[in-house]
Image (spheres, rainbow, N blue to C red):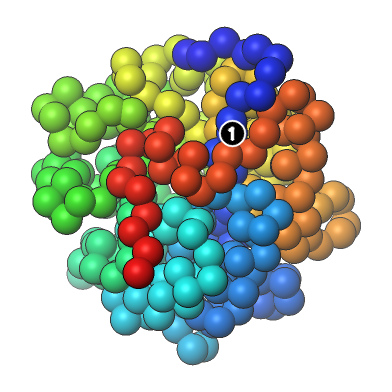
Amino acid sequence: MTPFRFGPRKVIVTVAPTGGMATKDQSPHLPVTPQEIADDVVRCAEAGASVVAVHARRPDGLATCDPETYGEINSLIRRRSDIVINNSTGGGVHGDMIHQLDNGLWEIDFEQRIKGLEGAGAEMCTLDAHTVCAAFGDKELLVTTTPSRSRWLAEETRRRGIKPEWEVFSLAHILQDVSLLIDDGLDDPPFFVNMVLGADRGFQGALPYTPRILQMMVEHLPDGAIFNVSGIGPTQLPATTHALLLGGHVRVGLEDNLHYERGTLATNVQLVERMVRIIRDLGMEPATPAEARQMMGLPALVTS
């Protein structure tokens, strides 16, 4: 854990503009087409975001990991911004991403999820090295990432030169497959660990945000890790502010939280701008994309 200190510490701000759950019916500000996503990401980068967590959507607005759609989104972003591009291998809870098993249970399809690795232009990909159950509407959806699947994902990201973002929802996720795969040499330090808190009402096995829970998780990170915090819904603001005080990095965006305050829908740019204000009020500075790459051990961006 890096202790909090005043001074010009650089903070990586990730924006998660779309996600794989919310729809336009819930917020008209949610970007879903490739052009909408790219336009929103460029505005967020100008506001201080240095990484984008990309989820793709079909023309009907539902979730997909289609490589061509990812490639289009990534290309539209890269033409106008040097922001770090991180594609999801989590997918979503509707659209292409789900299928029903013979026993009647629903599952988020692993074979669809892993197409996120194929989207041209991704520098990072999420790696959820755990199995959970997501409740969405009238469905309970298995998110099955067994130890062998987790290892395959880690091997494939390494083979393709993609940096994994280790996404964890609980202490067990840190201490089990994530630590094992890192110990086996399937990622190079610094290890970028994204701790998602406040998703406990929608994901069985996830933890709520409390100061003690976040402190505990930070204290059990692998040596050589840097950490990022994503707070879901109303926990976004306190969890990310606490992350800053513990020496971490932060994620905001409509994937995690549709509201700016109770009763008021947010835009991605508003959430980034507020986070940047808090960072600066605490005596820190948002990292540029080039600085974020250096901090996470990514190659410098090569421009033609």
Name the one closer to the observer, 40 or 97.
Answer: 40
Is residue 21 at least partly visible in the picture? Answer: no
Q: Residue at x 21, y 35 (%)?
A: 187
Could you tell me residue 46's position as x and y percent?
67, 58
| Residue 85 against residue 115 in the figure, above or below | above
Q: Badge 1 is on which residue?
A: 11
Left or right: 106 in relation to 1 = left
Q: Residue at x 61, y 57 (%)?
A: 45
Q: Residues within 10 Å of mark 1 (few under 14, many from 20)?
A: many
Is residue 68 at least partly visible in the picture? Answer: yes
Q: Amino acid at mark 1?
A: Val
Left or right: 14 in relation to 148 = right
| Residue 224 against residue 298 in the figure, above or below | above
Could you tell me residue 145's position as x and y percent?
24, 48
Name the one closer to the observer, 38 or 65.
Answer: 38
Could you tell me residue 89's position as x and y percent?
33, 58
Q: Residue at x 78, y 56 (%)?
A: 270
Residue extending furthest toward the front: 304
Q: Residue at x 20, y 51 (%)?
A: 161
Local secondary structure at mark 1: strand
| Residue 176 against residue 15 in the figure, above or below | above
